[in-house]
Image (cartoon, rainbow, N blue to C red):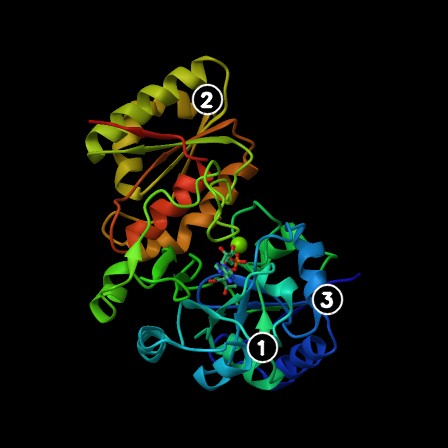
Amino acid sequence: MKTKVIPVDRDRPEPQAIEEAAAALRAGKLVVFPTETVYGLGAHALDPSAVQRIFDAKERPANDPLIVHIAHIGQVNQCAAAMPAGARKLALSFWAGPLTLVLKKKPAVPDLVTAGLDSVALRVPSHRVARALMEMTGVPVAAPSANRFSRPSPTTAAHVLDDLDGRVDLILDAGPTDIGLESTIVDFTVEPPVLRRPGGITLEQIQSLVPEVVLVEGQGRVDQPQSAPGQLTRHYAPRAVMTLFEGPPSGVVERIAAEARTAAAQGNRVGILAPEEDLLALAPLIAAHASVGRISVQRYGSRNDLERSGRELFAAIRALDETGVDVILASSVGSDGLARAIRDRLMRAADGRIRTVV
Ligand code: TXA
Ligand code: MG
């Protein structure tokens, strides 16, 4: 199929573009649209053959359930059988926005969407283009991130084309997304409710409203039963072998420099993924090697601006991968607040390879 790309204004989306995309969705076609987190690959959620096309286009395993996007909280009862008080509280505070709630599902939601689970993941995106599209379409829209399975989530239409050109009908291109990390997922079908995926809304923000929500440490490791399908460790996999370094920034920088020199001396092409402060400190330590092109560096934001780190992370991983590096040495930016979500994505990209520097 030929993929059509329509540029849209992120603040005032052109009605003709939204109408065309909404008609395509209602007709069972695949439409990629921007959300405030990442680009989503959308299909009519109540049409099983449309939903099947999502799995085919992404080459996504059928045991990985999809998030259903709705226009407003009033649409929850089209898909969910119940909304516990805590879930309602979070929805009223954080919707529209980067929060997904897992609730008991209604039979109207096809099993394909939920991978056979009796729960459904729901979210109201805040991006103007996404909201206009949800409103105009008038039906729930199933949409995972618009990347091939195991590639980093796309934060630009160019990323989407890299992965899915010829596999989707339409892409609404509204430029880079704001948050750059997928939504926070909280599961209210268990007691107490569980944070399934950290994201743009932090655990701290959630617990300030619903203190019962817990974090299950170590969840989603490949060697454990999958309570949330799709929470596989290796989910944001670069082609290069990545290792994540944690600890005091000065120690991390020295360790990365040493590892980079060793790996480069062994004939590897080395990529370094780090916030800008670390890259500045690294520059003199790797200068001789970088000048001969054996070490490439890629910035993702700053330790002082984690929102920028989140926004730039996936694009930075893609960019490093494109340089054809064999190994990636990454520096972490902390572990709470927004850094929890950033660290989660880095750990997945690193497939669990973490080195703690003391
Ligand atoms: O920000 C986002 O959430 C983006 C944009 C496009 O909205 N979407 C996204 O979808 O990240 P995706 O498919 O890449 O992640 C969906 C994940 C699944 O892998 C699974 O972990 C969780 O949501 N999920 C979906 N349905 C679930 C359910 N019924 N129970 C538990 N987890 C579920
Ligand atoms: Mg995804």
Asked whether the viewer can see residue 288, the reply is no
Closer to the camera in the image, 121 or 134: 121
The residue that disc 2 covers is: 292
Closer to the camera in the image, 342 or 51: 51
- Cβ–Cβ under 8 Å for marks 2 and 3: no
Q: Quadrant of the C terminus?
A: top left
Q: Quadrant of residue 108?
A: bottom right
Q: Which numbered tag is attached to residue 140?
A: 1
Q: Nearer the viewer, mark 2 or mark 1?
A: 1
Q: Using the image, determine if residue 329 lies above or below residue 153.
A: above
Q: What's the distance in space between the residues labelled 2 and 3, CA to CA?
A: 43 Å
Closer to the camera in the image, 304 or 97: 97
Q: Nearer the viewer, mark 2 or mark 3?
A: 3
Give coordinates of residue 142: x percent, y percent. 59, 68
Q: Using the image, determine if residue 153 lies above or below residue 109.
A: above
Asked if ligand 1 lies within 8 A of label 3, the reply is no
Q: Dot 1: few (<14), some (14–19), or many (≥20) neighbours within 10 Å?
A: many
Q: Quadrant of residue 36?
A: bottom left
Q: Earlier in the sequence, mark 2 or mark 3?
A: 3
Q: Using the image, determine if residue 224 lies above or below residue 285.
A: below
